[in-house]
Image: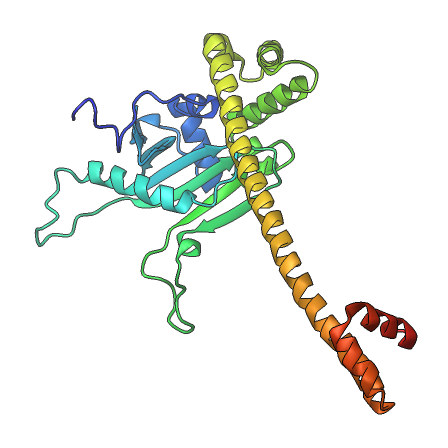
Amino acid sequence: MDKGDNRNVQRNYKDTVFRRIFSEKESLLSLYNALGGTAYTDTEELEVTTLEDAVYMNYKNDISFVLDWELMLYEHQSTANPNMPLRDLFYVAKVLQGLTKDANLYGSELVIIPLPRFAVFYNGTDPCPERETLRLSSAYGKKMPMGEGQPDLELRVMVYNINLGHNPELFGLCPKLGEYAQYVQKVREYAKEMPFPEAVGKAVDYCIRNGILSDFLSKNRAEAIEVSIFEYNEELHIKSEKELSYRQGHKAGVEQGIKQGVEQGIKQGVEQGKERLNLLYGKLLSENRLEDLRKSIEDEEYQNRLYEEYGL
């Protein structure tokens, strides 16, 4: 690939604490068991298929692996994203392309592939249900006609809220996930009292002392602090972009509303003026005040005096 060709691939993106924790096979297997109600113990059965060191279509793939003919794609998010089914469609196509690179896709024999499953682990500050299913079909500009069943291409993503107080059964089945949630909560608590970089450092020290991700944080203290700050800055950037878009849209909406309001006001004023004038003409004609009618047409000031006379 040419050095200048970065349209589809961007190298060396930042890890997240979540991805670093669950890149370890024991933790990943524990998370898989927690979601599926299984009890696998042999990490050698788990084949990692994560798209390492690359971002395809400007999106990064967090964790993917194959176990017992299931292809799992896990993503961590601190901001809600309704486009995950479409992103996962890109990811799974790329992963399956790698898994079948030596297969004869044009032959007469069926090429067997693992069953794909998709999960998102959300721990942002915006409200989110305990669990929520996102569907690719929600993005289709045209919906299936009534009575024709499901669309030919569908992809479902299960979103799990992993903030403390949500989905506690998962934390019980996967202790590392629960400890990660505690770490995030502790960072947020300290961030209310001090600058964020200091809050992260203090949260890391607290967790190490209290047995929360202690092995991971002790071995990776500097990196954990760095990526936590990066995640925070990235989340702030995304929120600021959304707020900017909202403000720009709000401003444009207000300006458009004012313009429409003025136009509507002028239209209503004209209509009301016509109605008022017609009432005046009607009263003058009913009283046979033809000379006053003629003068009111030619003299606006005289017309206003007649309005006052009739209380119009």
Quarter of the image that includes the N terminus: top left
As drawn, 131 above or below 282: above
As drawn, 125 above or below 184: below
Residue 90: tell me if it is visible: yes
Quadrant of residue 2 within the rendered picture: top left
Q: Front-most of 243 and 142?
A: 243
x, y percentage for residue 25? 38, 24
User: Image point 66% across, 17% down: which residue?
Assistant: 190
User: Image point 32% across, 56% down: which residue?
Assistant: 153
Residue 129: tell me if it is visible: no
x, y percentage for residue 141? 40, 59
Quadrant of residue 36 within the rendered picture: top left
Q: Which residue is outermost to the left?
A: 107
x, y percentage for residue 91? 32, 39
Q: Front-most of 17 and 38?
A: 17
User: Image point 74% across, 77% down: which residue?
Assistant: 297
Residue 153 is left or right of residue 200, and the answer is left
Q: Front-most of 299 and 259?
A: 299
Residue 230 is left or right of residue 54, and the answer is right
